[in-house]
Image (cartoon, rainbow, N blue to C red):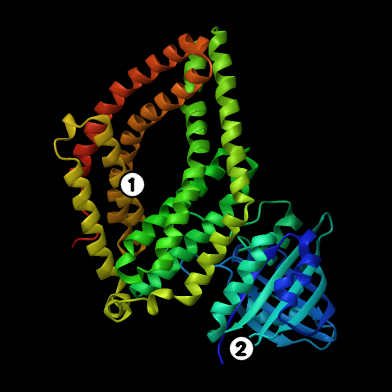
Amino acid sequence: MSSTVFEFVLDPAAARALLRHPAIGRLRQGRARPSPATLLFHDAADGRLAAAGLTVVLESCGRSRVERLEQIVPGPAQALRPAGPLPVLAKRPNLGAVGAAGLAEAARVAPALLTAVAAAVGRRTVLRLATAEPMTLTLFAGHLRTLAAERPFARLTLSVPSSGLAEAGALLRALAETLPLTVPAVSLGEEARALALGVPARPLRRGAPDLAEARTVEDGAIQALGHLSLALAAAAPVAAQGTDPEGVHQARVAIRRLRSAMTVFRPAIGSAAIDDLKARAGEIARTLGPARDWDVFLAQTLAPVRATFAERHDLAALGKAAQEARTKAYRAVRCLIQSSAFRLFLLDMALMLAERPWRSADGAEKREQTLETPLADFAAVALDKRLKRVRRAGESFATLDIPALHALRIDAKRLRYAAELFAPLYPEKRVRRFLKSLAALQDALGHLNDGASAAGLLEQLRIQNAPRAQAIGVVEGWVGRGAMTARTDAVEAWQSFLKREPFWRD
């Protein structure tokens, strides 16, 4: 019987609590079987394996010795399921002192050039679970060790028969509700490499999806939603720290792209599960929004005003108040990222993509043809629909008021997300020209929106402290002056965009 394997990262401090969790206690069959285990990660001396997203692993567990050539970072167009382990590209038993050199040929590296860079040393505990279709739970916990650093880790793996996904989902949700168990954004091998080199780990996914290898609509939907879930998981810890504005920005972009992809692929994968996840993604976006708004206000609106009027102490006080508002917004972001609701969202995304609920939902037979449609055919129809909406919203562009321009900006952003989603299916040069024109329009409209957003944020500061009115008036005047230039730029960007041929049309 085929099975699905899930891998999750767990706060090492909660490793013991996992094995005592009531949800596991009700299902465990027999005694746990712990064994000492070591993974020794190797790279070529010149770093070529890691650069290609590979490592040679020498695994020792009890009396077993195995060598593997495996991925630590997937290729950009490679299909990857959230919480799904990366592929093992070659594997063989190792019985002697040959070490990792046994896979040198498969790795295209001379044996003498392989060197150990890090080790994962700990205990591997295996539990059999007495579910309707027996599942196997494995906890590997210990320390990542290098010559210069050491850090604890814990990973949970669950092997689930294909007919047991619903039961596995119930178990995993029970664990994630009370334990810091979540979808990994980085592979264990990459985490070890980054620790050894003292560099940030490369996430499994970031940015926009690459659907170049997706053939059908269903392939594209699964790959896009999986990619964006992992991009959100990668951005979340940076957003929670609050020191780098890029963290919240990337988390917000990932969640917007995710919701856009759900809408784009709705004719094929529409279901109650998708609707629920899209609504929950919207709640996450609403929490991230204020933090991003304050970042933009401080860096792009208030900073140039303060630089121009450096002698005004009231502007410094206004900046301090805005910084306090930003701190409060980031506190909400931190609470969100650390919450069970966020962990459960990522978990449910992973489970949904494994279960494919649209295959059993009402109307599944009618959607069958759409699911099997070539992705490029589906993309052209979806992009045409969004382009028509943008052009319709921009009619009589020069006379549109700020709310209408804001609505146009949202439609342009939806078109851009969809265009980026399907871009790898088309010639790069044509795509680049169209996206450049669309980005210019979106940026020009964004500058107008930043002014409207700044007005709302200034009003919040005014309500909190009326004596700030004079400083707020200075900033409002600066924003108003910028809005006049922004509207002129927006008209030019709109006219340029209308002249650009859609890249998906021959």
Quarter holding the C terminus? bottom left
Q: Is residue 92 above or below residue 336?
A: below
Q: Which mark is residue 451?
A: none
Q: 401 left or right of 281?
A: left
Q: 324 left or right of 192?
A: left
Q: Is residue 157 above or below residue 323?
A: below
Q: 372 left or right of 478?
A: left
Q: Amino acid at mark 1?
A: Lys
Q: Earlier in the sequence, mark 1 or mark 2?
A: 2
The residue labelled by disc 2 is 133
Quarter holding the N terminus? bottom right
Q: Amino acid at mark 2?
A: Glu
Q: Position of residue 212 (x, y in %)?
A: 39, 68
Check if mark 1's residue and mark 2's residue have beta carbons within 8 Å.
no
Q: Residue at x 42, y 51 (%)?
A: 256
Q: Residue at x 33, y 43 (%)?
A: 439
Q: Which sits in the foreground, 174 or 253?
A: 174
Q: Quarter of the image holding residue 95? A: bottom right
Q: Which sits in the foreground, 431 or 450?
A: 450
SS assignment at label 1: helix
Q: 251 left or right of 147?
A: left
Q: Quarter of the image holding residue 83? A: bottom right
Distance, label 1 to label 2, CA atoms, is: 45 Å
The residue labelled by disc 1 is 413
Q: Residue at x 39, y 79 (%)?
A: 360
